[in-house]
Image: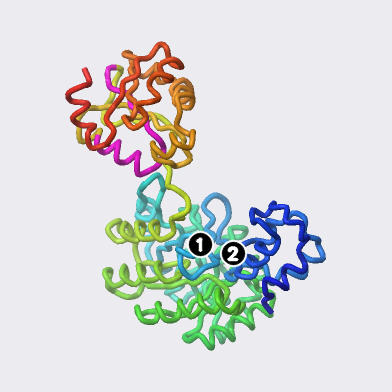
Amino acid sequence: MALSGIEIFKYLPKTNCGKCKFPTCLAFAMKLAVKQASLDSCPDVSSEAKAKLSEASAPPIRLVTIGTGENAVSVGEETVMFRHEKTFYHTPGFAVVISDKSTDNEIARKIEETKNAAVERVGQHLKVDLITIENESGDIQVFSNAVKKIAGLTSLPLILKSDNADAMKSALPVVSGKRPLLSAANESNYENMAKLAKENNCPLVVSAPDLEKLTALSEKISALGIKDIILDPQTAKAKDIIEKNTIIRRSAIRKSFRPLGYPIISFFHKTGDNMLETMLASISIAKYGSIIALSSPEIWKVLPLFALRQNIYTDPQKPMKVEPKIYKIGEPDKNSPLMVTTNFSLTYFLVAGEIENSKVSAWLAVQDSEGLSVMTAWAAGKFSAGTIAALITSLKAGELVSHKKLILPGYVSVLSGSLQEKLPDWKIIVGPREANAIPVFLKNEWK
């Protein structure tokens, strides 16, 4: 049973040391009670208290990891209903479904299409995350062969989709140690599926057509010792996605209802309509879907889904940043202008875009300002003459240009004198204050 903040407080050290990043132990206890803090943040809590508080401090939605290594996908561990309450932690994973009835050429082509379905946006690499292999043939050996072939073609985590426990048992040795997601346990096969999941240390999908049956099945499988569960509420309509996913999320977050405290998976690959499939996937992203299975990875289909996922799962409390380095805009050479700015992504893309508009190729040095804009970084002391000089020196910008001229943002013209002192071999030029003035500045002022 969930504990109140006051009950949790009784077990804490009551030193108000602030090591947990909260001002008092009571404030920390209140955050623990609403699942917005981790007990691990308190280094002084006793092991006895930790044991008693483990239930209260556990995240309302369990974190489940599929696959291993750098491509492993983790979903769950969310603590809020709405992003503005705090943040969402783990982005939904997109999975492309491949039938075991596919020919070798069809499998190879779909794996290649999935690999190519990736874009860079605002400094992030957006891609399809998993491959689902469906036992559409119903044949045990065909399924096992398809799993073996696909596992040899991709390093993405796998979802093995079959209701036949014998087919699953036959395929699992092929992917031993890769921690695939097993899909799915239902009312008729859950004991055998749970046994396979436990023996192979794999997460398990629990599938049922209504939430009452899903709850009962989740409890049964949890009682068998399976902790890493993903729920499949079998949603095929927009109304069902919104209704069922919201009830699951609300039960876990607001009522600490453990049988529904797991990530959600949705399969939309059999809609037969790409537009409908994309629409259902977008609703699932917005309404608590953790893994979304698609029929194919065409870029026109996944691009809006990538953007929607990125927008919803970007932490509004953390500024988006680009990598600090010197960027080539166009085809710059030793005579091209060198400009400097901060690594706040919006600032970078505004400046880079206006340089492109000018049709003047340039070098753009981007300094790590912890994602702050030029003025904010300057006010915080993170974009100063010292940090800019250190950037230009460390990146060996002098080897890129022969003119030794550095264009400073107009908003920090006050730094020009001190920067000139720190870079005596360079000529510091004050550029425009606004990015939209860059094209005129470069065409008229850069000689």
Few, some or many C-alpha atoms within 10 Å of disc 2 (few <14, some 14-19, many ≥20)?
some
Q: Residue 319: where, in percent of width, then height?
A: 44, 48
Is 47 displayed left or right of 164 in the figure?
A: right
- Report the side of 433 relative to 368 (left or right): left
- Which one is in front, 50 or 199? 50
| Residue 351 in sight from this viewpoint | yes
Which of the 4 image quarters holds residue 436?
A: top left
Q: Is residue 60 above or below residue 155?
A: below
Q: Secondary structure at mark 1?
A: loop
Dot 2 falls on a residue whose secondary structure is: loop
- The numbered dot on residue 3 is none
Task: Kindly identify the residue that appears in the image at 65 percent across and 56 percent down.
Answer: 23
* Magenta segment: 335-354
Magenta residue check for 336: yes
Give the number of the disc on residue 86: 1
Q: Quadrant of residue 191?
A: bottom right
Measured from the top left, where is residue 293 in percent x and y?
Answer: 41, 67
Q: Does residue 196 belong to the magenta stretch?
A: no
The residue at 37%/30% (across/down) is: 412
Q: Amino acid at mark 2?
A: Gln
Q: Earlier in the sequence, mark 2 or mark 1?
A: 2
Give the CA separation, mark 2 to mark 1. 8 Å
Q: Residue sitting at 39 percent across and 18 percent down?
A: 417
Q: Quadrant of the C terminus?
A: top left
Q: Position of residue 189 (x, y in %)?
A: 58, 83
Name the image colouring: rainbow
Marks 2 and 1 in Cβ contact (< 8 Å):
yes
